[in-house]
Amino acid sequence: MTAIIDVQQVFEGDEIILSAIPSPSELELWANAVLKYEGLSDQEVTIRFTDEAESQSLNHEYRGKDKPTNVLSFPFEAPPGVDISLLGDLVICAPVISREADEQKKKVSDHYAHMTVHGLLHLMGYDHIDETDAEEMEGKEIDILATLGIDDPYQ
């Protein structure tokens, strides 16, 4: 299982929030855990760390929600006949992740891991629109995070 992570770090601001953004090696560790769990290998993903303004703009444009959010997933759909191992893009809002971790009394790194796993599962086609799909996706998240030594994020 080899995840290829292209990191775009465009967040500029609070030094505490900036210092909590995961390293490429952490992102690879988390992504590889997802790939292993799903039986995949050699997948590429771009992960962009951004501010609330960009997150809100993208969330409004693509989801119709006029507020910043923790993670947005943009799956890549290759044209017919093109075989490429590109899952897509994740846009992670650093200030939202830090704020949520604080509110939920979680380690920021654990919340980043959860949102990375969550976003990657979205790129693979999982969703949580209805209760059955949500239970399946959350179960996968819990199992994958457990392999990383991270407690159930839904407790």
Image (tube, rainbow, N blue to C red):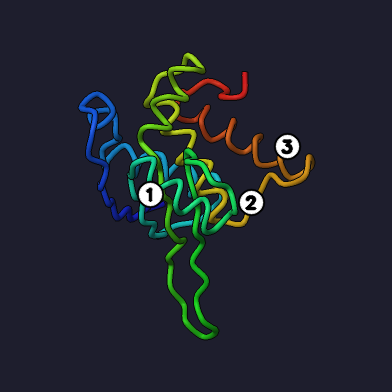
Give the residue at mark 2.
126
Say which of 30 and 154 sits in front.
154
Task: Return the disc, 2 or 1, that comes first in the chain's sequence.
Answer: 1
Left or right: 114 in relation to 47: right
Say which of 51 and 117 sits in front.
51
Q: Are marks 2 and 1 in contact (CB under 8 Å)?
A: no
Give the residue at mark 3.
135
Say which of 21 and 103 sits in front.
103
Task: Return the disc, 3 or 1, that comes first in the chain's sequence.
Answer: 1
Give the residue at mark 1.
54
Left or right: 72 in relation to 53: right
Q: Amino acid at mark 3?
A: Glu
Q: CA distance from mark 3 to mark 2?
A: 11 Å
Left or right: 104 in relation to 32: right
Q: Residue at x 51, y 81 (%)?
A: 79
Q: Amino acid at mark 2?
A: Tyr
Q: Amino acid at mark 1?
A: Glu
Task: Return the disc, 3 or 2, that comes first in the chain's sequence.
Answer: 2
Q: Residue furthest front?
A: 66
Q: Secondary structure at mark 3?
A: helix
